[in-house]
Structures are given as C-alpha cells and as structure tokens.
Amino acid sequence: MQFHATGGPAGRQRTACAVVGIHERGRMTAPARELDGRSGGLIGRVLRRGDFSGKAGEVLPLLGATGPAERVLLVGLGPADKFTRKAWRSAVVAATQWLARSGARAAILYLAREPVSGLDSYYAARLTVESVAGTLYRIPDLKTSRKPPQPRLARVGIGIAGAGLAEARRGIRDGAGIAAGAALMRDLANLPANVCTPAYLAATARRLAREHRSIRVRVLDRAALRRLGMGALLSVTRGSDVPPRLIVLEYRGTRRRTAPVALVGKGITFDSGGISLKQPAGMDEMKFDMSGAASVFGTLKALATIGAADHVVGIVPACENLPDGRATKPGDIVRSLAGRTIEVLNTDAEGRLILCDALTYARRFRPRAVVDVATLTGACVIALGAHYCGLFSPDDKLAAALVAAGERADDRAWRMPLAEEYAELLKSNFADLANVAGRDAGAVTAACFLWKFTDGLRWAHLDIAGTAYLSGKQKGSTGRTVPLLVDWLLHKD
Ligand code: BES
Ligand code: MN
Ligand code: ZN
C-alpha cells in the first residue's frame, strides 16, 4: 500500500474515489462542499433528500458522480460540535472497509483536513495511515477454504490543508513504519504456538536483521542461558520439550554510539500455567502470551523502516510454560541471574520469572532507560480492561513521557502505583522473595516483583494483558504498544 499527502482542493483532484466527511444534520465539510461544486450539486441533493444522516462511521457511495472523482464516498463524522478522535477513527475505518470491498485501486481521503481535537497534520496523516493499514490487515490464516479476494486498493492519498504538507509527509513515513511494525506484531501473536515457537521467534529476528542493515541479532540457547545462570527463566521452560531462546536485537540508528534504550518483551509462546494449570476455557488465548515480545519485534521493525536516529536494544526471553514430570513445582526455589532466590509458589506466575532474568541481562548494555512489555496479569485486565494498558514506574518523568506518548499515539497507558507496602507482600519464609502475593492488587504486586530487580535503572513496566489482543468473535492481536513505544522513542528528546 502506497500513501501520499496531497494539498489541493477536493474539487480539482482526479481520483478513483474521493472520500469526504459529512457531519450530522447534513453539515458538509469543506472538501465535501468543494466536490459538490464540481459535481453539479450531487452531494447536496443526497443530503436534502435525507439519504445520509452523518452518524459517525456511516458510509454512502455515490457511484454515478461526474467531475474529477469517478466515485464519491460520503462518510459520517458525527456531530460537528463534538468531533472526537474516536468519531474520526471510526470514519477512517468505515471508509477503508468500503474501499477494500470496492473495485477502486486508488482513493483520496479528505478526512484529515478536518480539525479533530488535538490532531495536527503530522498526527492526522500518521493515524490515517495506521488506521487504513490496520483495517486492511489480514490474519495469516491456515484455512484451506476459498479466501475472499484481496482488496485492489493500492494507492491512498491523504488530503491535507496546504500549510501542513511537510508535516503530513513525516506523519505518513512514521505511520507506514508503525503499521509495518504492528503488522509484524499481529502476525507473530496470531500464529499458533505450534508454529510460533521460541525458535520461530529467533528465526524472525534473524530475518529482520537480513532485511534491515540497521538491525543486529544474537540468539542464546539453553546451554548459554545455563552458563549465564538464568535460573528463573530456565525454571519456567523445564516442563516443555520446546527449547528456550534469549533473543537480543539491536537497532542502530545514527545515535548508535549513545547509551541505548532497552525494550524487554515477555515471550511465553504458550502459557498453560504449568503445574498450577489454568482452566481450559479460553486457554487457547495463551498463545498470545508472547505479545510483549512481538511488540518489541514490531517496534524495532518500525524504527528500521522509518530510519529513526535511535539506539535500541530489544531483549526477548522466549519459552513455553507447560507441566510434565520435570516441570517446576509449587514450592520449588530457583536462583535468578541477579543471584536472588525465588520461591515459586505458583507456576502460572511465570512471566515475572523470565522477565527478572531478562531485566538483569539488560544491565550489560548500560541502558539509559529500560521498558518491559508483558501480558503479565489477569488482574490488569480486571483493573483496566481493553482500553488502557497498565504503566508502572518509580520514575515520574519516564512515566509521564510514556503516558504522553500513549495519548498522542492513540495507544493509551494508565499509570498504576508501585509502593513498598505492596512489595512486602512478596515475602517468603524460604527464599529471598516469592513469585506471588495474595489475590489483592495482582497487577501491582507483579510489577513490584520486577521492581525488585531494577535498582539503579530508569525503568518502566507496561502490563498489556488487556490491550494486546481481543477475545470472542474478533479474536486476534491488536498490534498495540507498537504505536506507543515508537512515539515515545521518536519524541523522547
Ligand atoms: N499470562 C498470564 C496473564 C494473563 C491472564 C494474560 C489473562 C492475559 C489474560 C500470566 O502468566 C498469569 O498467568 N498470571 C497469573 C498470575 C497469578 C498466578 C498471580 C494471573 O494473572 O492469574
Ligand atoms: Mn501464567
Ligand atoms: Zn503468562
């Protein structure tokens, strides 16, 4: 898919399909009026007849249009006095869905010319690209039945008010990178665990390094992890026949000589719970338990596609959590890479065990900040649902920067507390700490466990258990956290 910014008036540009917004009560936007003037008042007649209400997300194709556009697609934007980002997004998504089913090979979207609350030309263009590409995304399915035809749509123009063209072009470039990264994340997370194994993730990392000269990769196998002393990570993988990997990616932009940011992603390719086995209902969704890892891959892919200046190290501990005769048992005590001993009271709290070793490993890169990303707790889903991910950090500045990036990127995070009172709940009679506390504040105590391993680091933790994927009819990866992380990395300083 090719995107381009265009500054001219809607009435003068030739295209297979011009997409213009209409507010409720038949209120035309400026591009709609321009087009109406050049097509003999067609849009005005449709509105006067009451054939289009302008509700957010409503679409109406006008196929017999005369003038520079072969087709005109009206899209509802909701009330003119309350033009929210949400209404704008649903208009872009609805337009894309119609275009994908139509025969149009090209289109120009004039929706970004509207002043949407808080969107400048850069973000209007970037979010348009992300929405269009995200809507056209198809799951790598293993169905043998006949597939729906591929959309013909190949070129999408984004109509921009003249003054913002240069900004919009940057937005398109960054949006295309983010879309490519989000698609990679979604592909990896959507694949089943018998395909997307730790070795498959490692092979994907190697492919990224082949595709982008700015990415380097190193993969550690079980023997290397043993030599390092990653006892916490290794305790999780004991019950599985699929061997673990620690995957280290490095993105080297022009600032490659400065201290890197480290991104650590939870890569549990399947989480059965281990001996503390999960309930069967919905257990298939635990193939998504490597979404943190996938978001780190996606973020590096985005940075490489954009050609960002940054220096970023991605660290992905990858393994399966399964029960068998060798599996770690409740009460077992393991020794982490940091030297601290951990009593594994619940083998289903495995994410923190692989992450604490990966966080310790991150220290060797002397990072200027470390952010881990993990589908860490069901408790975070209870607390925040699917709209905000949980953000935990002892560093107010880092937390504020991540929250702000999430707002701008439309990939929001809500800050949650870290406090000694919660951390105390992880006390063990037998080891330095336990891997679980009680039922209360489960997302917070999980974050506190990681906190114990990040002394002296500028660290933040994102719990994406609720935002990384959807359940039910729409089951699948969302690609989320890639927009937030890329935005933060691009606008950090
Ligand atoms: N991967 C799960 C967390 C999870 C749950 C993600 C639901 C997405 C949806 C994690 O490994 C886990 O099992 N956490 C336990 C922790 C508990 C044993 C303290 C949980 O949340 O129940
Ligand atoms: Mn678990
Ligand atoms: Zn898990």
Image (spheres, grey):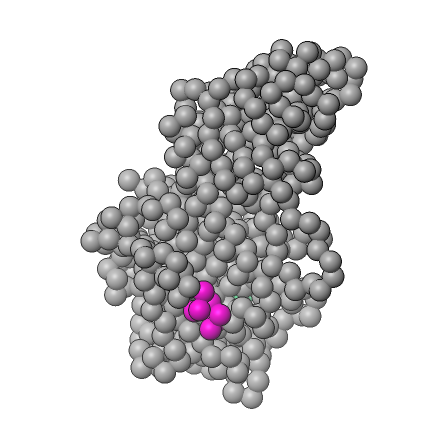
Q: In the image, what residue occupies the spot 51% across and 30% down?
A: 158
Please report the residue visible at 47 percent of the width from the left and 79 percent of the height from the top.
Answer: 243
- Direction left: furthest residue: 257
Rendered residue at 24%/53% (across/down): 256
Q: Which residue is most to the bottom?
A: 325
Q: Nearer the viewer, residue 133 or 10?
A: 10
From the top left corner, tell me how far across and down residue 252 is, in percent: 28, 54
Indicate whether 206 appears above or below 149.
below
**Is 18 placed above or below 129 here?**
above
Magenta residues (range): 198-204
Of the pair 378 and 203, the residue shown nearer to us = 203
Instruction: Tell me if 414 is positioned left or right of 24 in this view.
Output: left
Residue 213 x/y as whole percent: 32, 57
Q: Is residue 363 visible?
A: yes
Left or right: 459 in relation to 122: left
Question: Residue 488 vs residue 437: left or right?
Answer: left
Residue 286 visible in the current orientation = no
Residue 437 lies, in percent from the top left, at 50, 66
